[in-house]
Amino acid sequence: MINEIESLDEINEQKIVDTIRALSIDMIHEANSGHPGIALGAAPIMYSLYAHHLNIDPNYPNFFNRDRFVMSAGHGSALLYATLYLAGFPIELEDLKKFRQINSITPGHPEYGITPGVDCTTGPLGEGFATAVGMAMAEANLRTRYKGIINYKTYVLCSDGDLMEGISYEAASLAGTYKLNNLIVLYDSNNVCLDGKTENIFTDNIIMRFQSMGWNVIIVENGDNYQSVDKAIEEAKKSTDKPTIIEVKTTIGKYSINEGTNKVHGTPLSEEDITRIKEKVGIRDIPFAISKNVLEEFSGIIKNRCGNLQEEFIKLLQTQNEQTQKEIDYFRGSDKSILTNDLYYEPPVDKVESTRDSSSKVLNSIVKNTPFMIGGSADLFASNKTYIKDGGDFSSTNYLGKNIFFGVRENAMSAIMNGLSLCGFRPYGSTFLPFADFLKPSLRLSCMMNLSGIYIFTHDSISVGEDGPTHQAVEQLLMLRSMPNLDVFRPADANEVIGSYKAIFAKEQGPSAITLSRNKTPILEETKVNEVEKGGYIVLDTMKKPDAIIMTCGEELHLVLDAVKRLKTKGIEIRVVSMPNLGRFLKQDFEYRESILPVEVRKIVVEAASSLSWNQLIYNTKYLICLDQFGTSGKKDDVYKKFGFDVDSLEEKIEQLLK
């Protein structure tokens, strides 16, 4: 065992590196699927990082004060799993043999919550890089708040592909601005991408680009030398006030017959090639044959260096006051619900208010009173109304600031929210609803990991008017509602805004989205705070069996109520159902859904958005008064009238449908 060896000189570290290589290509060959190029080329990087730098405890993979590692080049999953196994994480050799197979803990790309030691789901290139920036921001906040208790670094392995994706530069720019010196990126620079040489499509001067964004840049000319990588990481850890990127020049598919070419990127190696590689590095040509010494030595190096980090951390926590312990337990725990006992809302005198303004009041009453929430806007604080008064601004001189200025970087904002969530926060971010398209890749990963970010989307309909169709949401609600695990609210007024946030804050886990209006709407007597959690409820009923039931939400609710009240004078009795959360309503039991929408009564939907959201409730498209085309520029009332969502048009349409 390593603890019986006095010096690393007695360990064949190169043998461990080459075992990582061999084990990785065995996994890929067994699965007949995967990416051997990065596994062969970047193994020295992974060994150096795990053996000599990462503060981790394989016996406690989720130890809170551990260093985080993000495999942003998620196609390198075999390399990661092989490293974790040899490092002593609770992964069995049988798990490696089931690489990319159904129900295994070694999926095709790293998945958070599936594999011990995987800190983030990655695969879409650039996403891991940006998520790591959120992890580093979380640490900066926690380190400042809990001095001497929380102090970790975030490491990333990224590829050329990660740096081609725009999100990596969105996030890197913020990391430099915020001087996140706890962030170290290892760039596997092999000059090859899937389609060929990078010189054909990626000639950026990485050094100058990152230096211009406020980063330290270190270059390792020979990435096959693990000692050179080791020295570079050590240098990066000593850097003062900047994040660091280490460009490690590697050879993709090292030792393969196709080394240095795109042929070895994503195609399993032949048996002959595997034999040649193992002969070159001195590894037995037997699949999954692991030297006991290699296992003991690699895990022993980590054990000697890291000691009992989990136990030491728990002992340190026990010396803190009760409040500090309680707060850190929240960050460490899986229950991300927030108490809303202190929620305070004061309605305007005239009882008319935009839902974005109502949201602002609720956020301000909750966020400033909890250390667990932090968030901001993609350069739209004034429009989204998400600025927390007296909350301070997150900056390189104030990591405790509540307000994050993400700039015009929607996708990075969402990925950073994921990073904050993965480190225990309950973050939120905001932009216009049409720009939800910009952040969908990161939002999708949030839903996959079931993280607890809150997405606040304003300007949620064609009623924004003059800005025209580029700023008028139509299909975005459908996109959000179709996303697995995403809880989507579209409240009609202040009452439903409060109800939406109460439901969101009560959740222990999972992402939520709330869409809000720019325009003022009446605070209705008919809406109910406590009914929102069910997704849909009756806001206006009839004394006898209704002639029809209208479902609606958001700004359209008060317009529908006005139209229905007119129709009542004509003897037409209509029940109105507010549906602030369609997904929640569809999950209610049959009895509740039937009490709201009895099967024998005709149903109509009114929503100035895509009709496709409603196909589980409405089977005849003529009863869908929706919008399946882009909007237009003009005054709000004129736009509503053009598309038939003014009260006069609604009254006429509904009456015609019921004749």
Image: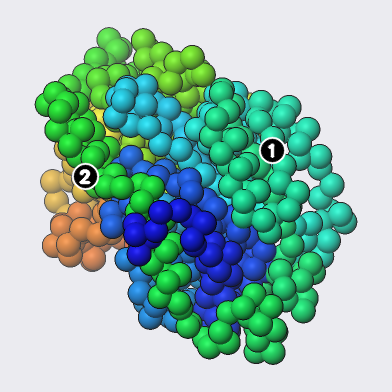
Which mark is on residue 218?
1
Q: Residues within 10 Å of mark 2 (few under 14, many from 20)?
A: few
Residue type beneath disc 1: Ile
Which of the pair 407/187 is nearer the observer? 187
Observer able to see residue 337? no
Which mark is on residue 371?
none
Q: Which residue is mark 2?
A: 311
Q: Residue at x 47, y 83 (%)?
A: 289
Mark before the other along the chain sequence, 1 or 2: 1
| Residue 9: image location, x then y, percent | 52, 56
Observer able to see residue 600? yes
- Secondary element under disc 1, as helix, strand or loop, is strand
Q: Residue at x 54, y 72 (%)?
A: 19
Q: Residue at x 72, y 42 (%)?
A: 219
| Residue 557: image location, x then y, percent | 35, 37
Q: Is residue 655 above or below residue 356?
A: below
Which of the pair 17/70 is nearer the observer? 17
Q: Quadrant of residue 393?
A: top left
Mark 1 vs mark 2, CA separation in Å: 35 Å
Q: Residue at x 60, y 35 (%)?
A: 235
Which of the pair 358/98 is nearer the observer? 98
| Residue 545: image location, x then y, percent | 17, 55
- Secondary element under disc 2, as helix, strand or loop, is helix
**The N terminus lies in quadrant:** bottom left
Q: Residues within 10 Å of mark 1 (few under 14, many from 20)?
A: some
| Residue 265: image location, x then y, percent | 70, 69
Left or right: 138 as drawn, with respect to 213: left
